[in-house]
Image: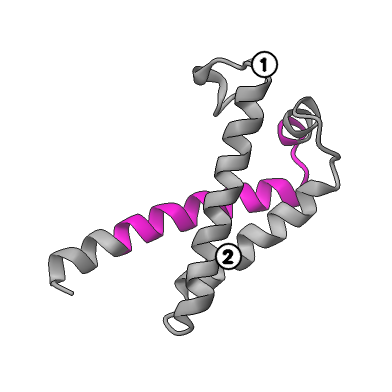
Amino acid sequence: MSKRNKIIYWIATALLSVGMLNVGIVQLIKLDVEVETITILGYPPYLMIVLGVSKILGVIAILVPKFPLLKEWAYAGFFFTVAGALISHMILGQPIDSYYFPCSFSF
């Protein structure tokens, strides 16, 4: 792998890892907005613990340099998690601009 490709890989991996770690922590601490979102989607709030733990473990699996098969499974898990969330929002008919902020915020 060339130096350029390694840089691109690690930038993409870092961005994915930070995003998933952030969401995993938010789900574990059961932030009110996240609880409201998952409830609107029709899922039980206890599912947030399973999702949060799996995202944090997935980030660890991706960042560990060995175990390529485990890394592949972590990437697959992230894909199915994001695809499932996208489909859940689409089924409810939420507009595309609300995928990141599905609940009403008051600033």
In this view, the residue in front, 41 or 34, is 41
- Give the SS element for disc 2: helix
In this view, the residue in front, 72 or 7, is 72
- Give the SS element for disc 1: loop
Nearer the observer: mark 2 or 1; the answer is 2
The C terminus: image quadrant: top right
Pointer 2 and pointer 1: residues touching (CB < 8 Å)? no
The residue type indicated by label 1 comes to Ser
The residue lying at 24 percent from left, 59 percent from top is 8
* In the rendered image, the vertical position of residue 29 relative to residue 93, given as above or below: below
53 to the left or right of 64: right
- Residue 104: mark: 1
Coordinates of residue 25 in the picture (x, y in percent):
66, 52
Q: Which residue is mark 2?
A: 58
Coordinates of residue 45 in the picture (x, y in percent):
84, 41
* In the rendered image, the vertical position of residue 88 relative to residue 61, given as above or below: above
Write down the quadrant of residue 31 in the picture: top right
> In the image, which residues are magenta?
10-34
37 to the left or right of 74: right
Q: Alpha-carbon neighbours of circle 2 within 10 Å: few (<14), some, or many (≥20)?
A: many
The N terminus: image quadrant: bottom left
14 to the left or right of 4: right
N-terminal of the pair, mark 2 or mark 1, is 2
